[in-house]
Image (cartoon, rainbow, N blue to C red):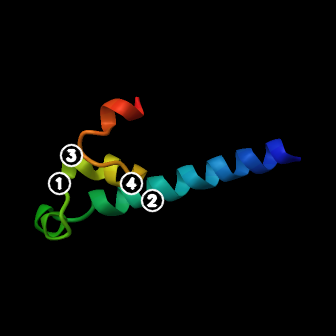
Amino acid sequence: MSIMRAAYRSFRDYRVHRMAERTLAAMEDALLKDIGISRSEIGLVVRGLKRGQEDKAG
């Protein structure tokens, strides 16, 4: 049963991250700048990484 729970959690997390990426991507550049991120950082922000950590996350 724990394999099913892990699979469900993984799928749920994927959906939440995808929704967050889509929401941020739909924002105007000025609004993104106001909240302190650039368009190229959206994926990193959603995954909770900071600039410079993307190489370590591999």
How far apart marks 1 and 4 lie (CA) works out to 12 Å
Residue type at numbered disc 1: Ser
Q: Earlier in the sequence, mark 2 or mark 4?
A: 2
Q: Earlier in the sequence, mark 1 or mark 4?
A: 1
Circles 3 and 1: CB atoms closer than 8 Å: yes
Rendered location of residue 4, percent (x, y): 81, 46
How far apart marks 3 and 1 lie (CA) works out to 5 Å
Q: Earlier in the sequence, mark 4 or mark 3?
A: 3
Rendered location of residue 57, percent (x, y): 40, 34
Residue type at numbered disc 4: Val
Rendered location of residue 1, percent (x, y): 89, 47
Closer-to-camera residue (39/28): 39
Figure disc tally: 4
Provide the secondary structure element on which disc 2 rests: helix
Q: In the image, 7: left or right of 24?
A: right
Q: Which residue is mark 1?
A: 38
Provide the secondary structure element on which disc 1 rests: loop
Q: Which residue is mark 3?
A: 40
**Residue at x 32%, y 30% (from the top left corner):** 55
**Residue at x 20%, y 52% (from the top left corner):** 39
Q: Which mark is residue 46?
A: 4
Q: Which mark is residue 19?
A: 2
Provide the secondary structure element on which disc 4 rests: helix
**Residue at x 28%, y 56% (from the top left corner):** 25
How far apart marks 4 and 3 lie (CA) works out to 12 Å
